[in-house]
Image (cartoon, helix red, strand yellow):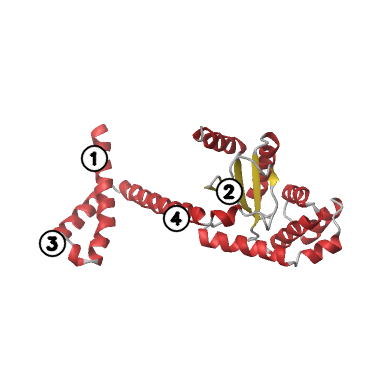
Amino acid sequence: MFMKLKCISYTILFVVYVFVTIPLFAQDKRNNSFSENEMATIKKLALEALLENPEILREASRILQAREEQKRNDNVSKQIREYSSELTDTEDTVVIGNPDGDITIIEFFDYNCPYCKTAAKDLQDLIKSDENIKFIPREWPILNNNSIIAAKAALAAIAQGKYKEYHWRLMKEGSLTEAKIFEIAKDLKIDISNLKKDMESEFVINHIAKSTALARRIGFSGTPLFIIEGKFFPGFVPLEELELIISDIRESRM
């Protein structure tokens, strides 16, 4: 049994090698070290291996997909380093938690994203329990028009010193409508007239434009998206995992 598995493993590697390298050789015949007959033999052996062990095609596909995903992740990490100063700049937003915290968490989010809402509760609990968290929120409304209205309203609330409270309340609600967005603002004693005026301010428009530009340049594809001390984590990250990530980062500094 062990020998059979080992044989299949070698076969998988062989097939992956064939289907990855042959196109490369074909692109530049000057670098092709195989004759046409040898290339034909290699292709034949690969096809015979697939016919004898069809399950290796799925495994080969998985290996290639994993390789492509790693390549994309490496590129995103590189872009995050390149745009580090723009990502950590807080002139167009606010800091929730400790402005001098030793752990910086940046989140790209949408107020109508259900996973963002789930993540918000854990993030809020983390900030309450860990006094050294510096949270930088980046509004990135990508789902619908109400997402844009919510993002604009939240950013406009900064002028009235109400962003933090408004942010958490918007995250607690289900699907947000325009009426619900302003209803929550009224509950928090936010001046609606000034809020609507500030929603179209240069400050608000520039924040959203910057978030969109950064997301596209770096290669983000959806929300939520967390960047913790320069490392990115796409999707919902549970509280226990957040705590472990932060603990590992702090231990690495010792």
**Alpha carbon separation for disc pair 2 and 4:** 16 Å
Q: Is residue 1 visible?
A: no
For residue 226, which numbered disc appears in the image? Answer: 2
Q: Are marks 2 and 4 in contact (CB under 8 Å)?
A: no
Contact between marks 1 and 2 (CB within 8 A): the answer is no
**Amino acid tagged 3:** Ser
Please, what secondary structure does the residue beneath circle 1 have? helix
Q: Are marks 2 and 3 in contact (CB under 8 Å)?
A: no
Q: Residues within 10 Å of mark 4 (few under 14, many from 20)?
A: few
Q: Which label is found at residue 7?
A: 1
Q: Which mark is residue 75?
A: 4
For the residues carrying marks 4 and 3, which lies nearer the camera in this image?
Answer: 4
Give neighbour class at mark 2: few <14, some 14-19, many 20+ (Cα, 10 Å).
many
Residue kind at label 2, given as amino acid type: Phe
Dot 4 or dot 1, earlier in sequence: 1
Mark 1 or mark 2, earlier in chain = 1
Point out residue 91 in the picture as x, y percentages from the top left corner.
67, 57
Of pointers 4 and 3, the one earlier in the residue sequence: 3
Tag 4 near tag 3, CB within 8 Å? no
Q: Position of residue 94 (x, y in %)?
A: 70, 52
Please name whichever residue, 211 or 50, is drawn nearer the observer in this view of the structure: 211
SS state under label 2: strand
Check disc 4 and give the amino acid type. Answer: Asn
The disc, 2 or 4, on the residue closer to the chain's N-terminal end is 4
